Image (cartoon, rainbow, N blue to C red):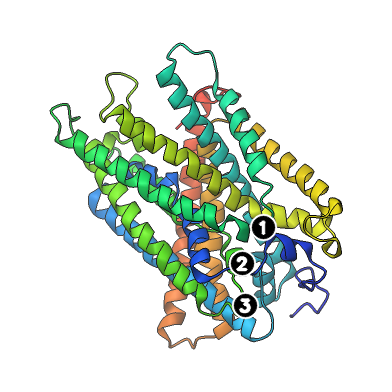
Amino acid sequence: MADGEHGPFHEIGREEDAGAAFVLQSKGEWWHAGFHLTTAIVGPTILTLPYAFRGLGWGVGFLCLTVMGLVTFYSYYLMSLVLDYCEKDGRRHIRFRELAADVLGSGWIYYFVIFIQTAINTGISIGAILLAGECLQIMYSNLFPNGSLQLYHFIAMVTVVMILLSQFPSFHSLRHINLGSLILSLGYTFLVVGACINAGLSKNAPSRDYSLESSQSSRVFSAFTSISIIAAIFGNGILPEIQATLAPPATGKMVKGLIMCYIVIFLTFYSAAVSGYWLFGNKSNSNILKSLMPDEGPPLAPVWLLGLAIIFVLLQLFAIALVYSQVAYEIMEKKSADVKQGMFSKRNLIPRMILRSLYVIFCGFIGAMLPFFGDISAVVGAVGFIPLDFVLPMLLYNMTYKPTKSSVAYWVNNSIIVIFTCVGIMGTFSSVRKLVLDAKMFKLFSSDVVD
């Protein structure tokens, strides 16, 4: 460690670190890591892929989806190699921030990673609660068209359920929930794909137009916004924490988990993108389910099928919020819990219940107050996911394995860093532009989510 044994990224021994001992228990098998990875990446955001294709068209859309898939798999593979290298060297890292600071030998990178990681993870938790509330609202409005309940009422209901679920003590204890999440993601994807095919072959199929925007500047901005959306969908800012849940030695296990995850990604991402864009073209909504249930006219698919898909999405959102809350929970318990007292001792149980409940309440309140969180998430995604998923892993690999300047790995890694840094800058600019353009529609505690 370049900054000495007592730098800010110094690993506290596990016998003293409650965040590691309790939240990041290392008991899992490789397939458990696969469940966690799938929940972290394959979520309802895949239903926005037709919208991303809307800004890119068929050819560029396929190209970007494939390139992002290959680059992110390669990126996560490199990070697992770095984690394995450090473990063999006697420095098993269980947190992204400590891994980055140790390998790069810098104190400031520790704070940069924890800031970005916290922003992303909290943002995803807020977004999951907001979307779960919206799912409940959609079901309610179909059952009771003149009902009086507003979106924030449903967000409050989701928050109560999340408070109860947040008491699962460790990341490892979510393994069965995340297996269910994997099954749910396959379930609602194939339901939606079936609905799109059925609608596209029916006599009431919408007219299709795959042309891009006429203005050159609008086309460029839309393209970079779409690329940012795809990058954020593939994003996963907690891979070291997931690898931490594996029983040591963890070497080689994460790669198997990644292969499982990317098989699910291949099955879900392409089918959702192709079927949705094929049906709706440049009229694709930011959520395929909303497109299948237009405000005017009858639904384009059987109501029971769409209702079942919404229920599957709702249930998976709880798992996603739980997974991305784990970093916040380990930070809280590292400071608040006493590892010597035991995980379920009164000394540790009461602070855990209070702190986790307050965190969930905070996420629920922000989701209810800012139901236009999608635009904010696009900015956070461009600013956050690009550095964590497309820049740091390549940098960490280069610093650890030191490939020669004549090697393919050196040039591939540095090319990815340069290209995706530029993409991140453009994506940030286009996302901020969209946020400004949509600002006139924003209303605190609104009952309508701004797309």
Disc 1 designates what residue?
A: 170
Above or below, 389 relative to 119 = below
Q: In the image, 421: left or right of 303?
A: right
Query: Is any atom of residue 39 visible in this view?
Result: yes
Residue at disc 2, secondary structure = loop
Judging depth in this view, the residue of 134 and 161 nearest the camera is 161
Q: Are marks 1 and 2 in contact (CB under 8 Å)?
A: yes
Give the amino acid at mark 1. Answer: Ser
The front one of 258 and 226 is 258
Q: Secondary structure at mark 3?
A: loop
Query: Which residue position holds label 3?
Result: 248
Q: Quadrant of the N terminus?
A: bottom right
Q: Is residue 381 left or right of residue 14?
A: left
Q: Position of residue 106 (x, y in %)?
A: 71, 72
Say if 10 sits above or below 136 in the image.
below
**Residue 274: image x %, image y %?**
26, 48
Quarter of the image where the C terminus is located: top left
Name the residue beneath numbered marker 2: 245
